[in-house]
Image (cartoon, helix red, strand yellow):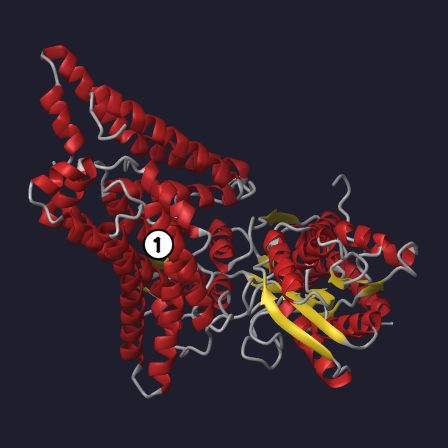
Amino acid sequence: MADTAKANLEVAGSSGKTSRSRELVYRLSRLWAWFFLGVMVLFFVVAVPIYNGGSVNFLTVRNSQNILVAITPVLLLGLGQTFVIITAGIDLSVGWVMSLASVLSALAIRESFNAGAPLFLSVIAGFLAGALGAGAIGFANGTIIAKLKVPAFIVTLGSSFIVRGLSLLWSENTTVIGLPAGIRAYGNESLFYLIRGEGGGFYFFAPPAVTGDMLRRMDRILPYPVVITAVAVAIAIFLLRRTQFGRHTYAIGGNVEAARRAGIPVDWRIIQIYTLSAATAGIGGFISTLQYTAGSAVIGDPLLLASIAGVIIGGVSLAGGAGTVVGTIIGSLIIAVLTTGLVELNVDAFWQFIVVGAVVIIAVLIDQSRDIIVGRVREGS
Amino acid sequence: MLRRHLLALAAGLAVAVASQGADAAGKIKIGFLPGVVDPFYQVMQLGVEKAAGELGIEVVTQIPPTWGVAVQTPLLNAMVARGDLNYIITAPTDKEQMVPTLQAALDAGIKVITVDTFLGDGDYAAGPVKFPISYIGSDNTEGGRISARGLAKAIGGKGIVYLMSTNPNVSSVEGREKGFKEVMAKEFPDIKVIGPEYDLDDPAKATQMTAAILQQHPDLAGVFGTNVFSAQGAGAAVVNAGLGGKVQIVAYDATKAAIESLNKGDVSLVLAQKPFDMGYLAVEFAAADAAGVTSLPKRVQTGFAIIDKSNVKDPAYSRFIYQVPGK
C-alpha cells in the first residue's frame, strides 16, 4: 500500500501483541470517516420519514442522484487538492480557478458556436478552454512554489486574487450568457432514466418523450456531470495508487529532502501536482457552465472551504504523506449527505456549517493522535 | 390605487379558496426558498407564514446563508427530492442560471412562483421563460428612477454619484441600476455616475469599495445603494469617513439601520419595498392555483413606500420598515 505512515508502523513496531493492537487502532482511525458517514445516513434514513409523517423518504433514487450531483463541484476541487495536501502543500486558488474556468468555457462555447461550429465541438472547445486555462494557472503556481521556494499558502492565495480579477475582467463583470440552448442537455441530462410505477421502465441515453404524471415519476440516473466526475475520480485513483507519479507524491509529502536524495524530480512533480489541482478545478468550472447554462465569475467562491473540509475529513493529513482519493470521496459525501438531509428535516441549512466544522476538527485530532500511535517522526515538527 | 386593487384581489382569492373548501388548500405543501438571510426576506417570510397559517398550509423554508447559485441550487434540489412539495416560492439568484434547476422542479411536478426576482425577462406570458405561475415583486426599474430623482434633488442636480450594486445578472438590482442610469442620463446631464460596481451582497465589501471611491473622489456628492446590504455598507463607509450628511445617500430597502441613518441625516431617501405583500400573495396564489383558479395574473407589482425625513414618523409609511418581531 502506498502509504508511508503504515510502512513506518511496520518498521517502528515492537513485538507481538503491542504491535497488533497498535495496528488495530490505526486501522480503526483510518475508517472512522466511513463510520461517521454510515451513522449519518442511518440517522437520516430513520429521522426523515418520522419527522415528515411518512411523506418523505431519505433513501430514494432521486435523493441518491441529487447527492451525487451535489458533491460534484466539491469533489472535483477536492481531487486535485488531495494530491496537493498529500505533499504537505495547500491550494487556496481552486475556488477562483473554477470560476475562471466557468467563464472561459462559457466564452469558448458561445464564440465557437456562433462562429458555426456544431454543438458537440463547441462543448469540446469549452472543456479545453476551461481545463487548459485552469491548468496554466496551476502551472504558474507550481513553478513559483517549486523554483522560487515561496510557501504554497502565500502563492495560491495571491494567485487566487489575480484569477479573481481575470474572471471578473473577462466576464465583463456579469454572468456570461447567450450560450446555445442545447447546452442545458449536456449539463442536466443523464445516462439512464427510470420511470417509477405504472407504465414505467428503464431507458438508456435518451429521455422518453413523456409528459404529465409520467414525467413526474421520471428520475435521472447518473447525470452527465456525475459521469465526468466519476471518470476524473477513476483517473485520480489510478494516478495516486498505481503510477510513479503517485508514489512520488507520497514520498514528497513524507520527507522532501529524503525524496530529493532518492532521486525524485521533486520540483517537476510539484509543478505537475499544482497543475493537476488547477485542472480538476477547471473541469469543475466547465461542468458548472453546462449545468447552469452560463459562465459565472463567482461560482467557485463558496466552494473552496467545503472542498478542503472534505479532503481533511477524508483522512488526508495536513502534514503530508498520507491520504487517499477514496477518503476524499467519503469526506465530500459527508458534506453533501448532511446538506440534503438537513433540508429534508426542515432544519436551517447553516447547521451544516457547524457540523462540518466540528467534524473537520475531530478529523484533525484523530489525524494527530494517529501519528502519536504510530510513533512517527515528522520533519520539522 | 394599485394597492387597493391588490387588496381586493387578495381578499377575493381568500374567499374563492375558502369557498372551494379548506380541504383543497389544506392538503398542499409549499417550499419557500428566498435569496439570502437578510431583513427583506425575513419580512417576506412573515408574509408567507401569515398566509400559510390562515389557509392551513404547511411551508418548508430554507434560507441560503449567502447569496449565490452554487448555494441556492443544492437547497432547491434537496427540496425537490423530498417529493412532497406542490409549489416552490423562490427568489432566483440568477435570472439565467437558475432556469434549468427550476425547470427540473417543474418536471418533478412542482409549480414555481418567483418573488422579488425573476427568470428570463420577467414576462411569463410572452418572454423566453414562461413556466412560473407568476412574478410577484416591485417594479425595480421604476424604483431606480425614483431613487435617481431623489438623489439628484438631494445633491442639487449636479455632481458625482456612486452606484453600488450587489450581483450582476440578478433581475431586481439590474432593474434598479437601469432605471437609475436612465433618469440620470436623460434628466440630469450634469450628474456623473460612477459604476455600477458589485459588492456581491456583502456589506463589508460594500463599505470597503465605497471607502475606496471616497478616497478617489473627495468631492463625491451622492451614493445609491441598490439593496439592503449595499446601502448599509455604503452608508457605513460614508459615516466612517466623517462625511455623514455631506455625501447624500439614497437607500433601497427600509431596514432599521437605513431608517436610523435617515433619522440621523446620513441617508436622505429610503425606498421601502413590500416583501410582506410578496410573501403573502405568493402563498395565496399557490392556494388559488391548487383550487383550480386559472386566471392568476402573471405579473403583480407590489409597489413602494418612499420614506424621507418628512414622513418617517407617519405610521402609514413607517409600517413598511422591515422589522421582524423579536429581532
Protein chain holding label 1? A
Q: Is residue B95 above or below residue A315?
A: below
Residue A166 percent across, percent down from the top left:
42, 67
Which quadrant: the C terminus of chain A?
top left
Answer with left or right where residue A109 lies relative to residue B111.
Answer: left
Instruction: Report the residue that reaches farthest toward the bottom.
Output: A116
The quadrant holding residue B269 is: bottom right
Q: Is residue B305 above or below residue A54?
A: below
The residue positioned 75% from the left and 81% from the top of the image is: B190
In percent of width and height, residue A223 lies at: 33, 60
* Quadrant in the picture for residue B275: bottom right
SS assignment at label 1: helix
Please tell me in which quadrant of the rendered image residue A218 appears: bottom left
Decide which of B131, A228 is in the foreground and name it: A228
Query: What residue do we see at 51% from left, 71% from top?
Result: A174
The residue where tag 1 is placed is: A72
Amino acid type, label 1: Thr
**Residue B184 rendering spot, x and y as whole percentages:** 73, 79
> Residue B225 vs residue A289: left or right?
right
The x, y position of residue A234, in whole percent, is 20, 52
